[in-house]
Amino acid sequence: MATKSLGNLGEDLAQKYLKEKGYKILERNWKTPSTGSGQIRQKEIDIVAQKNGVIVFIEVKTLLTSGKNPNRFLAEESIGPEKRKNLIFASKSYLISKRIPEETPWQIDVISVEIDQENKPKFFHFENEIC
């Protein structure tokens, strides 16, 4: 499966998972506004949701698993310092662009979606993972 289609599948499954957990989906694949110069690459947030008055920015990581995997995929370890910085920047850009009041609580979560050979997803939700 191509990386892009695997990512889209993971995001679809994560969105369904979030809805079942009571989250309201606000946006999907939201990108920071373009600068026009093309020098600064747009940043993207996979899913923007809301639950209990908190805006939740969600980074989705997807992995196909086959059998026993001793080196299990760890979503929280797959996001390096540059990605963290980009997620924080994009989250703040979203809040500003949507004119969301400064005092509105928000957080950045990571959802790891592991899809096995029978296409059964397993979710690992790391709440407020990135500060």
Image (cartoon, rainbow, N blue to C red):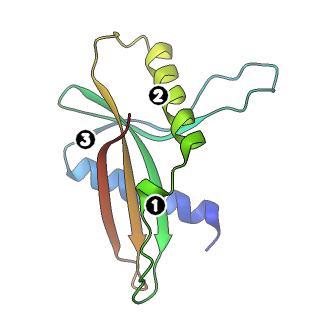
Mark 2, mark 3: which one is toward the viewer?
A: 2
Residue of label 1? 10
Is 3 left or right of 74, judged from the image as shown? right
Amino acid type of the residue that numbered disc 3 sits on in the rendered structure = Tyr
- Residue 77 visible at all: yes
Marks 1 and 3 sit apart, C-alpha to C-alpha, by 17 Å
Specify which label sits upstream in the sequence, 1 or 3: 1
Write down the residue under mark 3.
23
Which SS class for mark 3? loop
Spot occupied by residue 51 in the image (x, y as percentages of width and height)? 22, 34
At x 46% / y 61%, what residue is drawn? 10
- Which residue is outermost to the bottom? 67
| Dot 1: element | helix
Q: Position of residue 89 (x, y in %)?
A: 53, 26
Give the mark, 2 or 3, whose residue is nearer the N terminus: 3
Vertical arrangement, residue 3 with respect to residue 19, above or below: below
Q: Residues within 10 Å of mark 3 (few under 14, many from 20)?
A: some
Pick out the residue farthest to the front: 81
Q: Quadrant of residue 6?
A: bottom right
Q: Are marks 2 and 1 in contact (CB under 8 Å)?
A: no
Left or right: 40 in relation to 95: right
For the point 48% across and 63% down, which residue is it?
A: 62
Q: Position of residue 42 (x, y in %)?
A: 67, 32
Describe residue 14's horizontal placement relative to residue 19 as left or right. Answer: right
Reading the chain from its start, which is encountered first: label 2 or label 1? Answer: 1
Give the mark toward the camera: 2 or 1: 2
The residue depicted at 39 percent of the width and 49 percent of the height is 110
Badge 1 amino acid: Gly
